[in-house]
Structure formats: structure tokens, C-alpha cells
Amino acid sequence: MFTGLIQQVGRLEQVAFHGEAGRLTLSADFPSPLEIGESIAINGACLTLAEHNGTQRVFDVLQETLAKTALGDKSSGARLNLERALRMGDAVGGHWVSGHVDGTGKLRRVEKSGRDIILTISASDLIADIIPKGSIALDGVSLTVVDVDTGNGTFSVHIIPHTWEQTALSSLNPGARVNLETDMIGKYVRAALERQASPPTATLEKLRNAGF
């Protein structure tokens, strides 16, 4: 479990595959020691630390992960948002983030509003789970949704200068794909409502057998 508060920005060194399984290597300097097997969110995708040597960090990764996230678009030298998993007693300053990316969106516009940066992102497949003033993790960064345009399948977020400067979001350009994880609580609420609206298959079968 994560909070969407980025702790470090690392740099991608390489992704090497042998069949479907591979290794993602990046460089990052954490203030406290890392442990083999711990979970780290990389641009919002939870991966397991397999090796580390100095500032070099190596993670196991599957082709499926690269196919279903925007990590597959990154090349050597790319900046990556990093967050270690929560531990007992840690403060939750963002929102609950699982590290399981729901899908990707595409950055449409980058605009300034005073000192803030406004990002407009298209995400038609996920727009039903995105609401104004709701939470969303964008490349692992916990943000508040400002506007949602369901007709165009877009939403916008405002980013303060500190977040812009201290994360890899400032590396994004229009057209870039971004990892999105929608609000966990909202997804459970929607799933529960959908189950209530749709009678279970067994119930439908009983009604048919009764002549309804």
C-alpha cells in the first residue's frame, strides 16, 4: 500500500528481457537502506526489489506490466517517480494507493494558471471512476481531480510548484502516456452498486424457471 507522495525521483538505466520475464534497472539514492523483496511503486506500478548495489536498483518485471502500463514507453535516462510501501506508523498524507495501475491516459495539454500547472488528460476507459474533487494517482503522484468532461473522456488536475519540481511529472510532454490508478474506495462503491443493480445469475435462472 502507498500514499502517492513521491519520495525520490530515479533514472531508468535499462530494461532487459529473457522471454516474458525481465529486469528493470534504475538508479536512485534513498536515505534509509532498502531490503530485498520490498515493494516500491515506480511511476505508480508496484514492483519488487530483486537486487541493489550502491544506488543501482533492480526489479523483476513482466512483459504484461510493460504492456499494461506506460513504463514500456520509457527509455534509458527517463525520470521515474518512486515511493516505498507504507509501514506501520507511517503518516498517510496523500490517499490510499494500491500500486495496481488501472490503465493509462494520454496527456493532452500542459497549461499555467498563476504559479500552478494544469494537466488535461484523456482517459475514456476510466472516466466513469473519475469524479471532480476525487483522488487519482497520476504516474504514482496523489492528486485531486479538478474538472471532468465525460463527453470528451478527459479530466484535469492542478499541480503546485513543489510537486511539479520534485517529481518526474515535469518531464512530461503532450502526447505522453501516463499511469492512472483511480480512487480505491470509489471503485468498490461502483462495483457494489452494479451488483445490486444486476441480479445474480442464479436468481435470474430461478425467475426463468418460474415462468417469468
Image: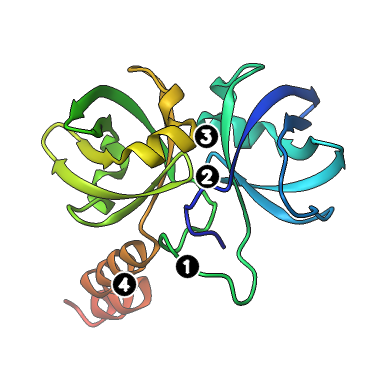
Identify which residue is drawn at 75% across, 56% down: 38
In the image, 55: left or right of 91? right
Amino acid type, residue under disc 3 in the picture: Thr
State the mark number for residue 44: 2
> Quick one: SS at disc 3?
loop
* Residue in the image at 64% along x and 18% along y: 77
Q: CB of mark 3 within 8 Å of CB of mark 2?
A: yes
Q: In this view, does 45 lie above or below 200?
A: above
Camera-near label (3 vs 2) is 2
Q: In this view, does 188 lie to the left or right of 10?
A: left
x and y, in percent, of residue 169 in the image: 43, 31
Residue ID for mark 1: 92
Q: Which amino acid does label 2 sit on?
A: Gly
Q: Which badge, 4 or 2, comes first in the chain's sequence?
A: 2
- Number of the front mark, 4 or 3: 3
Q: Nearer the viewer, mark 1 or mark 4?
A: 1
Q: Using the numbered discs, state the Cα–Cα distance from disc 4 to disc 2 in whole angstroms.
A: 25 Å
Image quarter where the C terminus lies is bottom left
Q: Is tag 3's residue or tag 2's residue first in the polypeptide sequence?
A: 2
Mark 1 surroundings: few (<14), some (14-19) or many (≥20) residues within 10 A: few
Residue 64 lies in quadrant: top right
Instruction: Please state which amino acid type lies under the numbered disc 4.
Output: Ala
Image location of residue 10, percent across then percent down = 64, 33
Alpha carbon of mark 4 to alpha carbon of mark 3: how far?
A: 26 Å
Let me know if residue 61 appears in the view. Answer: yes
Q: What residue type is labelled 1?
A: Val
Residue labelled with disc 4: 192
Disc 3: CA contacts within 10 A as few (<14), some (14-19) or many (>=20): many
Observer-nearest of 27 and 182: 27
Could you give the CA–CA distance between mark 3 and mark 2, rounded to whole angstroms?
9 Å
Label 4: how many Cα within 10 Å (few below 14, some 14–19, many 20+): few
Residue picked out by circle 3: 69
